[in-house]
Image: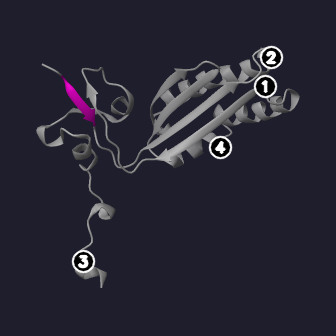
Amino acid sequence: MRQLTTHTPTDDLVVFHIGMRINKPWRPDAWLPTFFAMPPMLKELSRDPDSGMLDYRLLMGERGVTVVLWFRSADHVYRYANNNEQQHRPAWLAFLRRGHKVPGAVGIWHETYEIARAESFYGDMPTTGLARAVGVEPISSKRRTAGDRLQRRSSPRDVPVAKSALG
């Protein structure tokens, strides 16, 4: 029998993408420090339950790396990014200093998404992605479609306004 699952609903969730692109491959002295800075940060976040990081995935590309991270809130992301006592802030300042020596050798980027609702489907898969970050549950007969799963949480903005209330 097929195993169909979805992620466990959660009230707050932030998906954070961060990556680097090697623009000058012939200058490893300029991009290797950036490449090697991320693993200690991921280790630090993984070991600290108060960091708010739920899970991460490392994706290797043709000219760089992308990390997808799931956090409890944007505040957790920003608190980590700006804490001088943790790995990120010193690594960021070192990156800025190196960037002046070899401009354009490595590009970096990030995107932060605050997720109000999410839908997922995993068919015959080990727990992965969002389900690994927040938990997994079987798909019930009432939640077979993506639309049904997306509507499973209701909030005040999801409740239709009665026409009489419009005036």
For residue 137, the mark is: none
Per the image, the residue denoted by label 2 is: 27
Q: How far apart in space, not on screen, are marks 3 and 4 (Cα)?
A: 47 Å
Q: Measuring 39% from the left and 29% from the top, which residue is drawn there?
A: 129
Spatial separation of the CA atoms under disc 1 and disc 2: 7 Å
Amino acid bearing label 1: Ala
**Number of other residues with Cα within 10 Å of mark 2, as a class: few under 14, some 14 to 19, many 20 or more:** few
Disc assigned to residue 82: 4
Q: 133 or 106: nearer the eye?
A: 106
Q: Position of residue 92 (x, y in %)?
A: 71, 35
Which of the marked residues, 3 or 4, is nearer the chain's N terminus?
4
User: Answer yes or no: do the residues labelled 3 and 1 have beta carbons within 8 Å?
Assistant: no
Check contact, mark 2 vs mark 3: CB within 8 A. Answer: no
Q: Magenta residues, as a range?
A: 3-7
Identity of the residue drawn at 75% across and 16% down:
25
| Of 112 and 72, the residue lying toward us | 112
Badge 2 amino acid: Arg
Q: Give the residue at mark 3.
A: 163
Q: Nearer the viewer, residue 142 or 68?
A: 142
Rendered image: mark on residue 105? 1
Distance (Cα) linking label 2 and label 4? 29 Å
The mark nearer the N terminus, 1 or 2, is 2
CB of mark 2 within 8 Å of CB of mark 4? Answer: no
